[in-house]
Amino acid sequence: MKVLGKEFFLRNNVVDISRELVGKFLVTNIKGKLTSGMISETEAYRGVVDKASHAYGGKRTARNEVMYGAGGNSYVYLCYGIHHLFNVVTNKEGTPHAILIRAIIPKDGLDIMMKRRKQTKLTRKFSDGPGTTSEALGIKTLHSGEPLSGKTIWIEDRGIKFRRNDIIAGPRIGVDYAGEDALLPYRFRLNEKLITEITNEWHS
DNA sequence: CGTACGATCTGCT
DNA sequence: GCAGATCGTACGA
């Protein structure tokens, strides 16, 4: 087990990093409660040149300011007034790259996550989406700007490797407004068969 | 200051 | 399959 450090996030290819994050574990320790899940889906947002990015064209506001900082911090924002979407900031200071974590397979602290999600069962939909993933892990907008090497939120490599063919690239979700950039294959998702197998193994 | 809307989820049909 | 929820943020006046 290895906690990913600054050197992992400071690299400049956010699309490669996004693919590499599939299979890593997103872990939180919030109010003394440890919870985690294996990342099964991500999306890359490639900074000022990406029409789907909050930083497109160099847009810089109080909300997205942390994107302009060095990689290795969280960027959490509220979507549709309800959902707290968690992103990993990458690349050096001044290049606002980010990766949206879209889904996890729940692993540690299942009982805690079920309470947070107000669920009594671990269904397939339990944390299959960026809003439900953050809710399960207890991540809120107040955690925006947190360093990921810290004690609250971090990402672990537990040695799980997938074949490149098992990580499906495709267009990002919900970014139709981004014109031709909406078609870029910046979404990475573990193939459904593997998701099912791993889910069955961990939740039986 | 007023207003429109979003990197979504859920429950109901 | 679809509408409603729900509110911080962005942006124009």
Image (cartoon, coloured by chain):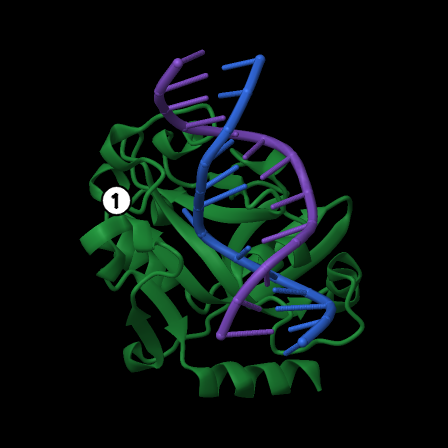
Chain colours: A green, B blue, C purple
Nearest the viewer among A133 and A30 is A133
Circle 1: element type:
loop
A134 relative to A173 in the view: left or right: right
Image quadrant in which you'd find residue A144: top right
Where C10 sits versus A203, above or below? above
- Residue for point 52% across, 40% down: A77
- Residue for point 77% across, 47% down: A32
Amino acid type of the residue that numbered disc 1 sits on in the rendered structure: Lys
| Residue under pointer 1 | A51
Residue A82 position, x and y percent, is 63, 46
Where A27 sits versus A98, above or below? below
Residue A35 position, x and y percent, is 68, 59
- Residue for point 57% across, 40% down: A150
Chain of residue at mark 1: A
Residue A19 appears in view: yes
- Residue for point 80% across, 72% down: A120
A175 relative to A23 in the view: left or right: left
Residue B10 position, x and y percent, is 68, 65
